[in-house]
Amino acid sequence: MADTDSQAPPPEPTPSEPTPKKTTKKAAETVEDTTTAGSTGGNSTAAATAAVTDTFKVVRERLQAGEQMALGGAVLIALVWVVFDLIFDDRTVSSFTLLIAVLTILAIWVHRWGHHDFGNGYRIVIGALGLALALFAVTNFLLVIRTGISASAIQLLGLLLFWVGGVVAGYGAWLVFRTREE
């Protein structure tokens, strides 16, 4: 009993030294519990990060590479419209191009999440919508090059993102169109 009383408590760590942590089975369970608790509502940043991670995981599981590219390009075009047309009031993406991007997103969602089966026509639908997005982006690029770039830096950023989104959606749509499901 004298041995336990004579032991001095460990010295307090200085602010520059990290606090030593004991690794026990109980501590590992506590860490797992805090990560799952954070994703259910504790810390809003952790919950948002977990939700986005889960969403990307589900998308990667359900979609092929071409569908992921077509979806990514269409989402990028929709985001460009929201940021640059709504927030900055800069006319970067036309309303018809936005409509085609939203239709691409909806077609992929409806088919792959099992709401409706397009059958063999699915690859034609995605191919047509994605290639239309690529066509709109390329014609816009050629128009800007022909008339000269007289855009501010923020407008140029919006145009570059629109062009990249259109080309990515078009290439992804081409990959979807080429594949044959049996």
Image: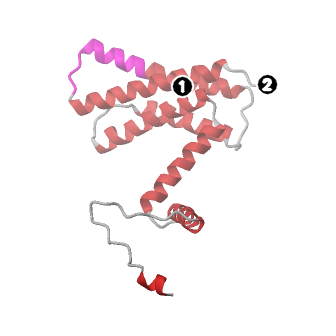
Instruction: Using a 10 Å C-alpha cutoff, classify the residue at mark 1 as few (fewer than 14 neighbours), some (14 to 19) or many (20 or more).
Output: many
Dot 2 amino acid type: Glu
Q: Secondary structure at mark 2?
A: loop
Q: CA distance from mark 2 to mark 1?
A: 22 Å
Question: Residue 115: x, y in percent?
Answer: 70, 44
Question: Residue 150: x, y in percent?
Answer: 20, 22
Determine which residue is flagged by label 2: 182
- Labels 2 & 1 near each other (Cβ < 8 A): no
Q: Height in image: 152 above or below 24? A: above
Q: Secondary structure at mark 1?
A: helix
Residue at x 51% of width, y 26% of height: 169
Q: Height in image: 68 above or below 47? A: above
Q: Nearer the viewer, residue 59 or 150?
A: 59
Q: Quadrant of the C terminus?
A: top right
Q: Height in image: 52 above or below 68? A: below
Question: Residue 100: x, y in percent?
Answer: 51, 31
Q: Is residue 134 magenta?
A: no
In the image, the segment drawn in magenta is 137-151
Judge left or right: residue 95 versus residue 32: left
- Identify the mark nearer the N-term, 2 or 1: 1
Judge left or right: residue 54 versus residue 3: right
Residue at x 38% of width, y 36% of height: 80
Q: Height in image: 112 above or below 143? A: below
Determine which residue is flagged by label 1: 130
Dot 1 amino acid type: Gly
Judge left or right: residue 15 versus residue 61: left
Instruction: Using a 10 Å C-alpha cutoff, classify the residue at mark 2 as few (fewer than 14 neighbours), some (14 to 19) or many (20 or more).
Output: few
